Amino acid sequence: AMSDCLFCKIVDGSIPSTKVYEDEHVLAFMDIMPLTKGHTLLIPKKHHENVYDMSSEVAGQLFSVVPKIANSLKASFQPVGLNLLNNNGAPAGQSVFHFHLHFIPRYDQTDGFKASWQTKEKQYTSEMFAEYAEQIRLNLSK
Ligand code: 5GP
Ligand code: ZN
């Protein structure tokens, strides 16, 4: 465990949290500054800074409990929607550098969640998509 990591301290119990799910590999607990009712965080117990830093084994352990938690939030609070959000890197909004997946139950358009989503399809061509896909495929196999 990283001694100066807030979420490692939540895992080891030296900082209290309101837990909703725990197994050998992962922990889910209430976000202390919730965006909406039921806002929950899911983390691997082992310290991984972000998605780049996780093995597929850890990612599998984490995502294997995602439907369970999502369905529990749905049954508990009857939200009209649910956003799953993971921020990687400070410019992307990450403020705690131990991987976490946000579960944000949605209730209406004024519930405080806003993701600005301005598409720019006019700037891209199918040739560009093909080039990007080729680049990604090359790096996948490295
Ligand atoms: P990020 O901005 O890194 O994606 O999300 C970090 C989240 O951790 C924020 O939503 C913030 O409210 C939450 N958080 C920060 N400190 C604590 C804490 O001490 N306890 C809990 N339960 N959540 C925290
Ligand atoms: Zn940590």
Image (tube, helix red, strand yellow):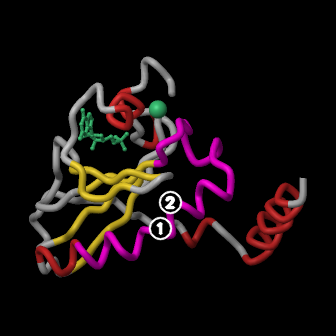
Is residue 67 on the magenta stretch?
yes
Q: Of the residues under marks 1 and 2, which one precedes in the sequence? A: 2
Neighbor class of circle 2 (other Cα within 10 Å; few <14, some 14-19, many 20+) is many
Q: Position of residue 90 (x, y in %)?
A: 45, 33
C-alpha separation, residue under disc 1 versus residue under disc 2: 30 Å
Q: As shown in the figure, which amino acid type bears the numbered disc 2?
A: Leu
Q: Position of residue 135 (x, y in %)?
A: 84, 59
Q: Position of residue 66 (x, y in %)?
A: 42, 69
Whether residue 70 appears in magenta in the rendering, the answer is yes
Q: Residue at x 25, y 59 (%)?
A: 114
- At 24% from the left and 57% from the top, the residue drawn is 20
Q: Is residue 103 above or below residue 50?
A: below
Residue drawn at x 21%, y 78% is: 74
Q: Which residue is the site of mark 1?
A: 119
Where in the figure is residue 123, as x and y percent of width and height?
61, 65
Q: How many marks?
A: 2
At 24% from the left edge and 50% from the top edge, which residue is drawn? 19
Is 1 situated left or right of 11 in this image?
right
Stretch in magenta: 44-72
Q: Which mark is residue 62?
A: 2
Q: Nearer the viewer, residue 30 or 92?
A: 30
Q: Disc 1 marks which amino acid?
A: Thr
Image vertical order of residue 16 relative to residue 60, above or below:
above
